Amino acid sequence: MIKHFPVTNTDKVCYIYSAKDGEPINYVCTTDFKTNDRPVDIFYRETPHPEFGNKYFGIAPNYGDGSYSIFNADEIEKFTFGMVEDDNGNLQYSKSNHDYKSFENGNMIDGGRDYIRSSGKVVYYVVRDGELVNEDKNKRLEALQKLSDLDQELGLYEPKTKR
């Protein structure tokens, strides 16, 4: 399980925006986005926003006055999240440049999206379709799909039809 440390009440944000837009919204992760050491919460909707066209949006607290900013966060799918196992067997990531995390099992992670400094076994995740997915598994699935598509193009394989 991936352990998150959001900067907003993510359940409340999901509830408000799901009701407002009539579209289910889910929390994805917390990370620096454009500014170092200013983590934001990233949310996802399956269909593009009717006015702005984005599927991901970020909520950023404005620490000076307690207000929040909302912005297009579709670029989140370009980010890589290095994760290490904590003492309870959960995966944890550094959410910002100086978010250093260390555990009694000897593992540590630091650097947010700027760099990955770690000890212990690091697993890499990326965001796809509103979820953090293991990058290695994702690459293997994409490669298998490309091979399947190529087989179909060359006539080496015909997909089974449903009965």
Image (spheres, rainbow, N blue to C red):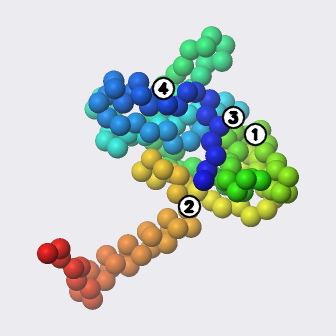
Image mark for residue 36 = 3
In primary-sequence order, the first of circles 3 and 1 is 3
Q: CA distance from mark 1 to mark 4?
A: 25 Å
Instruction: Report whether residue 120 is seen.
Output: yes
Give the CA separation, mark 4 to mark 3.
25 Å
C-alpha gap between disc 3 and disc 1: 10 Å
Q: Earlier in the sequence, mark 2 or mark 3?
A: 3
Q: Amino acid at mark 1?
A: Asp
Disc 2 residue crowd, few under 14, some 14–19, many 20+, Cα 10 Å = some
Q: Which residue is mark 1?
A: 99
Q: Mark 2 = which residue?
A: 134
Question: Could you tell me residue 68's position as x and y percent?
Answer: 54, 19
Q: Quadrant of the C terminus?
A: bottom left
- Quarter of the image for residue 48 reads top left
Q: Is disc 3 in contact with disc 1, using a CB cutoff of under 8 Å?
A: no
For badge 3, the amino acid type reads Asn
Circle 1 SS class: loop
- What residue lies at 31% left-to-right and 35% top-to-bottom? 23
Q: Which numbered disc, 1 or 4, marks the residue closer to the eye? A: 4
Residue 97 position in % (x across, y down): 73, 40
Q: Which residue is mark 4?
A: 12
